[in-house]
Image (tube, grey):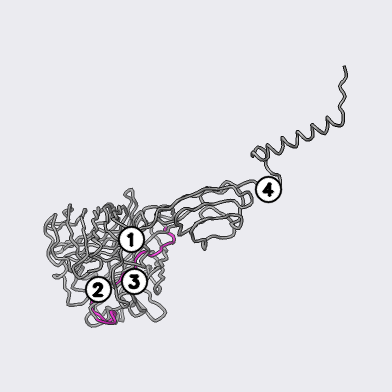
Amino acid sequence: MSLKFRKIDAVIIVILLIIAGLVLFRTGYVNDPRKPDTPEIHFVQDDSNKILRVGYVSTEVYWKDIYIEGEYDPSGLGEKVVEGNEITHCEGTIIIKFKPTQDILGSWTFTPKEELPEGVFSSKDRVVTPADEGDHYNKLLVNREWWYYTAVFSKNCELPGWTVIVSFNHMSRNDLFWSKPDLLFVTLMSPDGEKYGGVVERERPVLGDYSILKKPALQITSSEEGFRVEFEKSYVQGLSPSWHIHIGGDDIDINHQIEMDLQFFAPSSPLWTYGFRPIENSKSNIASYVFLSCEVEGEVKIDGLSYNVKGIGHHEHTWTSVLITKGLIHGWDWCQISLENGWNIYYSKYYLLPQISATKESEINSLSTILITSDNGNKITNLENINVNIIKSDKIFLLLYIPIETQVSAVPSNTQIILKSYNIKLDINIKTENTIDPDWKTLTGVGMKIGRSTVSGNIIWNDEDGDHDVEIDGIGTIWNMRH
């Protein structure tokens, strides 16, 4: 029996094939040949810093073909989508689609950023001039001055969680170090105990800058265009809000070859922490200002191996009077902290009484400072009523103890009426983790711990949005001194 197809049969088969094709196409089993394939793009969410970072892209893609829904800042994106691109200042829910196919690449929700109540400062409290950044130790009543830079390197660089401290110091001749008062401090500390750097000490000629035969190791030039502090082969130069630091020379670390080039940029105005003139703090004989939340990036070389780094840091410039003698300052604690949630804390304290106990509560806090910023230094919360409790110390020399664990609590003072209304309180525990420990065995002894610390605790307050309790988890640079 032979089968013959009629025209109507062929038409029916064609119609059925078309219908089947449409069904398969509509249900996604057959791709539209007119549309490109959807690329595979992986994004990494950094909730604390409000960033979506490109971690992987499968093929060549242009940002013009990417649709981003939500509140964000695209200013850092280039023409092509490449690994490392960052979508910044993300708020709420971000949805990303591939425009040609309308396929959703992903959806991410960022937790709302909590805002601390701001401290009250006058306009002059946050103004630094080129004259402030230059030298002051040539004044008759000033004999100490230092330029101090610190940073905590971020997780997504080649030295994650490492810390760096650099300080150029012009000390008094009758100070802690006697014949070698020109100092350069450099420390580079890892989370797992690696440590590099040290203290470079140099004698200063009797006539100082006026000596014909020999110049001091620490040299400074300054003008309206900027300043430059040199210590042999190392230097810092610039003018706010940007400074470049170069560290080099054989004496930075006697066991390793260390070289660094770091660029600091301050995204916000500084704050004067000390200064005793109604106007022009630069003319004060005792003064200090800090730039918080500096953006830091550059290169670190260790024994010939190069590492690209970036992170968050701070810069402090301080000078003091000849009237403040060795006997008036018995120690200090400095700690600059970078938190997991993107906040930054600055803590400092000068001790006016001998600290001869391994654990000792501080009852005099007139020379203590706590500054907290949740937005890279634009808004700063300062808490003036500070209590310090030394939990644990290392014995360095005879009756000389250096703290290795400190509990710090702070609330507004009675004069901070607005801040006090928020019932704000900070509690942090600072643990010294990886440091260099220089000491000078003079009659009473001088000891330091300089390097890396870890910080935990919380900060609470209440406002119109209710009660807030923010966990503090961070890495800090630390500098403790006692004599």
User: In the image, what residue type sits under mark 4?
Assistant: Lys
Residue, disc 1? 344
Q: For the residues carrying marks 1 and 4, which lies nearer the camera in this image?
A: 4
Which of the marked residues, 4 or 3, is nearer the chain's N terminus?
A: 4
> Is 246 rendered above or below residue 111?
below
Query: Residue 347, how many percent across, how many down?
Result: 26, 62
> Is 372 rendered above or below residue 208?
above
Separation of marks 4 and 3 at Cα, in angstroms: 53 Å
Q: Farthest front residue?
A: 8
Residue occupying image coordinates x 27% and y 66%: 382
Which label was assigned to residue 35?
4
Which of the marked residues, 2 or 1, is nearer the chain's N terminus?
A: 2
Residue, disc 2? 274
Predominant SS along the magenta part: strand
User: In the image, what residue type sits under mark 2?
Assistant: Tyr
Q: Residues within 10 Å of mark 2 (few under 14, many from 20)?
A: some
Q: Residues within 10 Å of mark 3 (few under 14, many from 20)?
A: many
Q: Is residue 382 left or right of residue 330?
A: right
> Considering the numbered disc 1 on the image, is that residue within a helix, a strand or a loop?
strand
Q: For the residues carrying marks 2 and 1, which lies nearer the camera in this image?
A: 1
**The magenta segment:** 278-300
Which label was assigned to residue 270?
3
**On the image, which quarter does residue 415 sit in?**
bottom left
